[in-house]
Image (tube, rainbow, N blue to C red):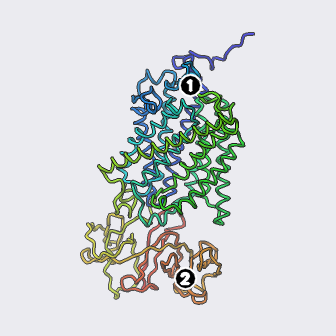
Amino acid sequence: MATVVPIAYQANTSLAVPNWLNKGDNAWQMVSATLVGLQSVPGLVVLYGSIVKKKWAVNSAFMALYAFAAVWICWVTWAYNMSFGDRLLPFWGKAGPALGQKFLVNQAQLPATLHKYHNGTIETSTAMPYYPMASMVYFQCVFAAITLILLAGSLLGRMNFMAWMVFVPLWLTFSYTVGAFSLWGGGFLFHWGVIDYSGGYVIHLSSGIAGLTAAYWVGPRSTRDRERFPPNNVLLTLTGAGLLWMGWAGFNGGDPYAANIDSSMAVLNTNICAATSLLVWTCLDVIFFKKPSVIGAVQGMITGLVCITPGAGLVQGWAAIAMGVLSGSIPWVTMMIVHRRSPLLQTIDDTLGVFHTHAVAGFIGGTTTGLFAEPQLCAMFLAVTNSRGAVYGRSAGGFQLLKQLVGAAFIIGWNAVVTTIVCLCIRTVMPLRMSEEQLSIGDDAVHGEEAYALWGDGEKFDSRAADISPKWKGKEKLNGLLDDRVCIGKQKVAADRTGGAGGEDIIRKPGGCVLPKEVFGDVEGAKEPCFFPVRTSLNVSAKEGEDLKESVAASRAKGSLSGVDYLISEDNFAPVLIKDEIIGGLENVHAATVAMVQDEVAVVLPNSEVMVEAEAYVDPEGFLGFSQEQLAMMLFYTGEDMSIPPLMIYEVIK
């Protein structure tokens, strides 16, 4: 009985539907590519912009965005064919554009993937998915782009952006294309049978090794940033991490080049391994640090995703769990223990630990794939027939594990050497590292932009403070930005005087500092006080003139740090860190509370309702002739709407 094929599934229904086109495969391939693209933009853009210190949010996000755009142009101009085109060398394809319609509308094929036996007969035909070359170029491009963005995670917070602009096309051309052709495009590792299902070696091992190497040549962040580099928004970090996790369905699910059984296995195993790894990492944090860390959970999630990538569609579910246990524990050990004890790793500033989360996890994934690759699943995907992991066959399986180790060694060696050469070449033309001034200020100095319209780390006080004598009385407010540099006396800065509210003149400085004329005085006579950083977090409510200890019901609770107690406010909001030797017993608390963090002092006066939850600066020797008890410095939120940018206010009271 004849079966009628619905017209929607028939070929040649239009010029855009040739008989070789499988609409389902084409749709899945484009969706997969888009999911991987979303991992980068906005996924890693958001993750990088939020996981770094506030003063580096714009720079970090922009490094990712720039890399994504730059790779696109390089990819379609020459890099695609170097990775998946005709063979030039055993590890490299011939460069050429992928822009013409005659190339893009034809059925996709990877010409160098034709695999033959030693006697010359064909073992596996050339890979020819049932969709156009345009879909293949798109799919492979987003993989190349995310590799550069992952690499950038090692360099955040100090690499000269101009150098990064040059680094991206050079590294893509001379490093990424070699790994991609060797393992995927029909190079010598592909034909030898090294397994890299979706990029454990090509993407993750290479980005981790190249990131560590580039971090060595670029140099470290500023000392202050290395000592303290808190995320500026943990919730946004989770948002970026969520996009990364869900996007991995396209990352691994699209690599069979079809919507088939293998892609389903890959997506399922991806989620199993990632979840296992996250849970293992979190448990280790709880066991050893007594607290579950959100950032730690994100790192565990990433290591699980990376680990399963080289074998996602080739292992069984139980193996995915085993790989998740290893990826959640071994990178944890290398990051938390080995890194801190290794003099070499201590000298290299890998900002986000890409070496541990990608290189180590990618290597674990590649080697465990050599152990757990299941023969039947391998037959569905690999060009080399009879491939299997070590647990499924003594001689063949053991040889597969050896292949995986050799493949990893090639990727490690090539990336370390080429990345070094690229960095040294760029260094002859321009500095790899930002200037000290840019490192001190951050986004505002590098891009002239800031992520948040509020005062905080990295903003620089480039105006001169007022020369006010102690005779000055009353209460005034000085809105501005302070500097943590050593006192340098007068600064020669260009200032414009413009009329302000109520006829009051205002001095505006490059950093946005606004100073009332009555406080500022003449520009020529201005002086600059000394300030040093204080980190506080407290909530205090008191009426003017009221003793703080009478207005706040406080309890003493022993903190986790030795010798540190907590003074809890009435509503248990945001504890104040207190050192016994500074504040003494609770009965000795006076109208001014001293908060002590890392031997730095901040003073809060009980004359207004304020909330302090940021880095602040205060002069320990007194400000402009006034004592500490007369100086209050706080982050004052204008109104109850927390989205309103706060102003940095310090009040002088006489």
Q: Give the residue drawn at x 46%, y 56%.
A: 57
| Residues at marks 1 and 2, CA–CA distance in whole angstroms | 74 Å
Quarter of the image with the N terminus is: top right
Give how far across and how far down residue 537 sits, in percent: 54, 72
Classify the position of the C terminus by image quarter.
Answer: bottom left
Q: Nearer the viewer, residue 191 or 218?
A: 191
Dot 1: element: loop
Q: Which quadrant of the structure image shows residue 315?
A: top right
Front residue of 112/14: it is 112
Q: Residue at x 60, y 47 (%)?
A: 364
407 over 620 or under it: above or below: above
Tag 1 residue: 129
Q: Residue at x 55, y 20 (%)?
A: 119
Task: Give the residue at the far left of this rendering.
Answer: 524
The answer to whether the residues at label 1 and label 2 have Cβ atoms under 8 Å apart is: no
* Residue at 63% from the left image edge and 27% from the top image edge: 385
Residue 95, numbered circle: none
- Select label 1 or label 2 by which is in front: 1
Image coordinates of residue 288 in percent, x first then y, are: 65, 64
Q: Amino acid at mark 2?
A: Lys
The residue that label 2 is drawn on is 543
Residue toward you, 298 or 628: 298
The reply to whether residue 455 is in sight is no
User: Which element type, helix, strand or loop, lies under badge 2?
Assistant: loop
| Three-letter code, disc 1 | Pro
Q: How many marks?
A: 2
For residue 641, what is the image quadrant?
Answer: bottom right
